[in-house]
Image (spheres, coloured by chain):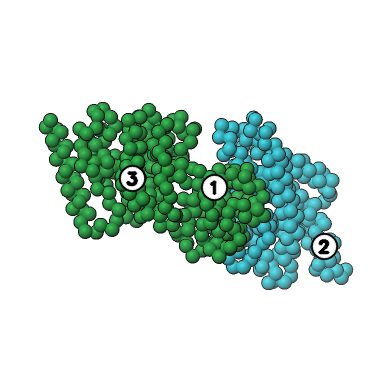
Amino acid sequence: MDAIFSNLDLYWQGFRMTLWLTLASAATALVLGTILAAFRVSPVASLRWFGTVYVELVRNTPLTIVFFFFIFVAPQVGIRTPSFFVSAWVALSIYTAAFVCEAVRSGINSVGVGQAEAARAIGLTFTQTLQLIVLPQAFRTVVPPLINIFIALTKNTSVAGGFAVTELFAIGRRLANSNPADVIPVLIGIGVCYLILTIPSGILASWVERKVVFAR
Amino acid sequence: MRTKRFIFAAVAASTALALAACGDDDDDTTTEPEDVEAGDFEEGTTMAELADAGSITIGTKFDQPLFGLRGPSGDPEGFDVEIGKIIASKLGIDEDGIEWVETQSANREPYIEDGRVDIVVATYTINDERKEVVDFAGPYYEAGQMIMVRADEEEIESPDDLAGKSVCTVEGSTPAQNMRDNYPDANLELFGAYSDCLEPLRQGQVDALTTDNVILAGYVSESPDDFKLVGEQFTEEPYGIGLAKGDDEFRDFINDVLEESYDDGSWVEAWESTAGEVLETPEPPEVDRY
């Protein structure tokens, strides 16, 4: 247990990095995923096609390979980021956006088609229809799956630990190596840190769900 | 007496075979076995047993360029391998009598304790934790942490120049800890394996890679146009030969062999034909008869 308490500052450092990476990637993925979902339901065929290819390509690729691409391959073809943190952020956002897109699209599909038809009938454009009528209703429906995706994202940030981002998992490896006798307590400590992030997200999710629920 | 004569004949025959095998392609560093027999060693010692059997099992690395790397030919090559051959030859065992076994960092102690190998020559750093379970002859080489940079780098010449630079190494490793303790101004970028640092270094995402010089020398030998080593080694990692704990006679014997090889030039020859292709030839370290 000493290995944990004498290294609380390292745990805190890793915890903060994991938290930042999660929040930054979640925000970017939410925006990107919503835009992609709009593409997938848009009347323009090429946008629909782009959205479909993106989702199928990205969500069927292992996250480690996405990381590998942004850290090792992209710089060779001239795509550079200022730091490995930024590369990890980009990789996680692009990966998670595919899942967000599918969740939001399912939400859009759950909104009765009559809503969109009525909006178009009173002269709203496609973008206005989506923004003002469909998406606000869609997001209420998809709160639980979105929180699911963000909990998965929190855990996925651990992949960044193998790619030069010193977050919880990397700290865990460092402490496990320097305290060979206390490997199990050290790793349990790391697991608890992830729970501190994910369990409140779940609670928040059910609270938000109750708040935004609407009767059909 | 009869068995003794037979052994002598066998050793002589194998020596002749080995010599014949060498023939005229003498450019490889074949170490000829000494003309010794089991009777030269005190009965009951490990040396007598091995010389009697005419074979020895040596653990080494199969994946460490310049020290122990098994190529397509099937036999490992490198400085550790040459040291193993020198020791075997002093027991009257030729190259065919050596069985090479791959030992990795994690299995060296168990292999020695179980008797699966007679000795281990495998970039094996001598330290006190290991001395509790095995004994070490040597050291026969002193490795140390060094810095590798891109071939066109001019700003970095010593670890002090790393302040403010991004330095790649492995999370949880001794070199990483050493950097944190002694050069806290360097920005560490920590990957899962040293080889992960190569591409970022080539692409300029990091400025340097630091770990033991022997690992770095292997990378430099693979891409001499891209990378170079700079400065002196700034830590000390004495490499020893691991053997069963408590076998003091065998340890003394190997220490004698090492000192002999320092004096007669075979150590330098072994170095220059292997790791010496990339690293400078160092002074042989003093053998530590603890």
Q: Could you tell me which chain the residue with mark 3 belongs to?
A: B
- Of circles 2 and 1, which is in front? 1
Q: Position of residue A144 (x, y in %)?
A: 74, 47
Horizontally, residue A201 falls left or right of residue B269, namely right
Q: Identify the mark at residue B62; answer none if there is no mark.
A: none
Q: Which chain is green?
A: B
Residue sitting at x 44%, y 59%: B221
* Amino acid found under the numbered disc labelled 2: Gln
Q: Which residue is mark 1?
A: B234
- Of circles 2 and 3, which is in front? 3
Mark 2: secondary structure: helix
* Amino acid found under the numbered disc labelled 1: Phe
Q: Which residue is mark 2?
A: A131
Please tell me how crowded label 1 is: few (under 14), some (14-19), or many (20+) other residues with Cα within 10 Å.
some
Disc 2/disc 1 C-alpha distance (Å): 62 Å
Query: In the displayed image of the protein, which residue is found farthest to the front?
Result: B263
Let me know if residue A109 appears in the view.
no
Horizontally, residue A21 falls left or right of residue B100, namely right
Of the two numbered discs 3 and 1 on the same chain, state the one appearing first in sequence: 1
Q: Could you tell me which chain the residue with mark 1 belongs to?
A: B
What color was chain A assigned in the picture?
cyan
Q: Identify the mark at residue B263; answer none if there is no mark.
A: 3
Rendered-image quadrant of the C terminus of chain B: top left
Mark 1: secondary structure: loop
* Amino acid found under the numbered disc labelled 3: Asp
